[in-house]
Image (cartoon, rainbow, N blue to C red):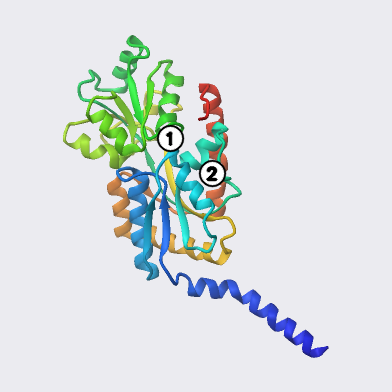
Amino acid sequence: MKTAKAVFAIAVLCLTGMPAAWAQSYPSKTIRLISPYPPGGGTDATARIIAQALGDQMGQQVVVDSRAGASGRIGTELAAKSSADGYNLVLGNIAPLAILPASGAKLAYDPIGGFNPVSLIATSDYILTVHPSLPTRSVKDLLALAKSRPGQLTYASSGSLGAPHLAGELFNLMAGVKLLHVPYKGNGPAAIAVLTGETTMMFGTGPSVVPHIGVGKMRALATTGGKRSMPDLPAMNEMMPGYEVTQWYGILAPAGTPPAIVERLQKEIAIAIANPKVAQLFVKLGTQPVSNTPAQFSTLIRSEIERWTKVIKAAGIKAD
């Protein structure tokens, strides 16, 4: 009997010690970080910065796996169905984790129960940019033009029910105008549409529009955050009080990933974000580096779903 009790006690000790052992030995092979958007946009650029930083710190390569399409739902679904072993991660953002769920779209993943949030990585405002041929130098000019040409001005986005799409719909609601939405498969293709004059404007990420603004191929009118993020550009809510659309990026693991591994990843992300060299790379993208806890990240996702549910309902947007 004593022998049986001793064996049981040893087994318990081994099991309780496993999480620490996992964390100490992890990672022992390449980690895959799924980016659910194509190259040329903020999600892909953010994924590559954090992948390099984590790989350098942890001594194992972190490979970015681009799986674009359907406003991020294809790559996000793939991540949710991947092995929950710490070697499959996804760079999530506002669209697949908050806006799509808020729309009532039929999703093959659960944004709350299907993942273990690890940490935010960065936040950023969108930049309202127009084709240089458009006779607008300010948001005030754009509002006047949109009211004089109802339904004639178009705006490109990274896809239906992505944050840039909702940024335009919120603009329509608050300004009482009608900009026509034209979806593309990512911010990169949307930017090309504006550059060629196929569409007249877009709410773009920094990586997709800043290079073109600098050489005069696009004209920036405002940023979409709650306050100025670029000294020479006004925030939209200076002209339209209450207007705010902020993109966020964060790393998530499939539900069931061992807590010790999630904790290890969160600590590594916090170290990476605090590294001035890494932080500067984010700043150059037009993003603000930030980290938080899994609980805080989970709370953010829930609050964003609630917020965008109200906007989508008011705009009468139907899910695909």
Residue 271 horizontal/vertical position (percent): 41, 63
Q: Position of residue 40 (x, y in %)?
A: 29, 43
Please say if 159 is above or below 88: above
Q: Secondary structure at mark 1?
A: helix
Q: SS of the residue at dot 2?
A: helix
Residue 291 as seen in the image, left or right of residue 298: left
Disc number for residue 163: 1
Residue at the image point whose x is 33% and y is 42% from the top: 41
Sequence-earlier tag: 2 or 1: 1
Amino acid carrying label 2: it is Ile
**How many numbered circles does the render carry?**
2
The residue shown at (50%, 30%) is: 320
* Residue located beneath label 2 in the image: 301
Q: How far across and how far down the image is residue 204, in percent?
A: 33, 35
- Give how far across and how far down residue 194 sits, in percent: 26, 28
212 relative to 45 in the view: left or right? left
Give the label on residue 11, or none: none
Which residue is most to the left?
A: 215
Q: Amino acid at mark 1?
A: Ala
Residue at the right extreme of this rendering:
1
Q: Distance of mark 2 from mark 1, alpha carbons? A: 14 Å
For the residue pair 40 and 209, the one nearer the viewer reads as 40
Left or right: residue 317 compared with residue 225: right
Instruction: Answer whether residue 87 is visible to the viewer in this image.
Output: yes
Q: Is residue 109 above or below residue 89?
A: above
Q: Is residue 260 above or below residue 36?
A: below
